[in-house]
Image (cartoon, helix red, strand yellow):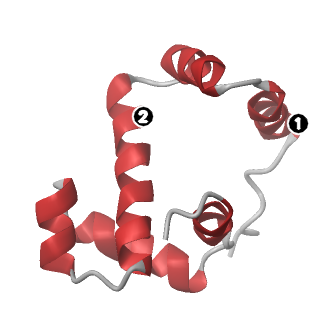
């Protein structure tokens, strides 16, 4: 079984540092627009919204209705919230999104 951190390397370190170097939301928008497709960005935003709603104990049908996310996406985000690295929890707590 591959190491769960095997995707971490010099290139992903540089990507993470690039995000940390951005100064404001407008710079983040510009970087994201150059880095990813609009669809990819919207998907990431949707997953964060799903995480927020799950942390508020919303039920799957409500989350589908509010976000348009599939139940598969909701299940994946729920699994990350329950067993993942804790990234969603850090952002939700830090940004008071819960």
Q: Quadrant of residue 85?
A: bottom right
In-image side of 91 versus 70 (left or right): right
Looking at the rendered image, the quarter that the N terminus falls into is bottom right
Residue lying at the far right in this picture: please name it.
10
Mark 2 or 1 closer to N-term?
1
- How crowded is the residue under tag 2: few (<14 C-alpha within 10 Å), some, or many (20+)? some
Residue occupying image coordinates x 17% and y 60%? 66
Residue occupying image coordinates x 77% and y 58%? 6
Q: x%, y% of residue 82?
A: 53, 85
Q: x%, y% of residue 4?
A: 71, 68
> Which residue carries the number 2 mark?
41
- Dot 1 falls on a residue whose secondary structure is helix
Position of 4 relative to 44 (above/below):
below
Mark 2, mark 1: which one is toward the viewer?
A: 2
- Dot 2 falls on a residue whose secondary structure is helix
Position of 22 relative to 1 (above/below):
above
Residue occupying image coordinates x 30% and y 70%? 74
Residue occupying image coordinates x 79% and y 27%? 18
Q: x%, y% of residue 62?
A: 15, 73
In-image side of 4 versus 68 (left or right): right
Q: Quadrant of residue 94?
A: bottom right
Pick the front one: 13 or 64: 64
Q: CA distance from mark 2 to mark 1?
A: 23 Å
Camera sees residue 97 = yes
> Which residue carries the number 1 mark?
10
Q: x%, y% of residue 81?
A: 52, 77
Camera sees residue 69 = no
- How crowded is the residue under tag 1: few (<14 C-alpha within 10 Å), some, or many (20+)? few
């Amino acid at each position: 079984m591959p190491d769960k951190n095997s995707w971490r390397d010099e290139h992903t370190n540089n990507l993470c540092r690039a995000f940390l170097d951005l100064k404001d939301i407008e710079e983040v928008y510009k970087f994201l627009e150059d880095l990813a497709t609009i669809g990819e960005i919207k998907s990431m935003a949707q997953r964060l919204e799903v995480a927020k709603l799950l942390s508020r104990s919303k039920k799957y049908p409500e989350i589908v209705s509010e976000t348009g996310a599939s139940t598969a996406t909701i299940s994946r985000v729920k699994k990350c919230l329950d067993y993942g690295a804790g990234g969603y929890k850090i952002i939700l707590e830090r940004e008071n999104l819960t």
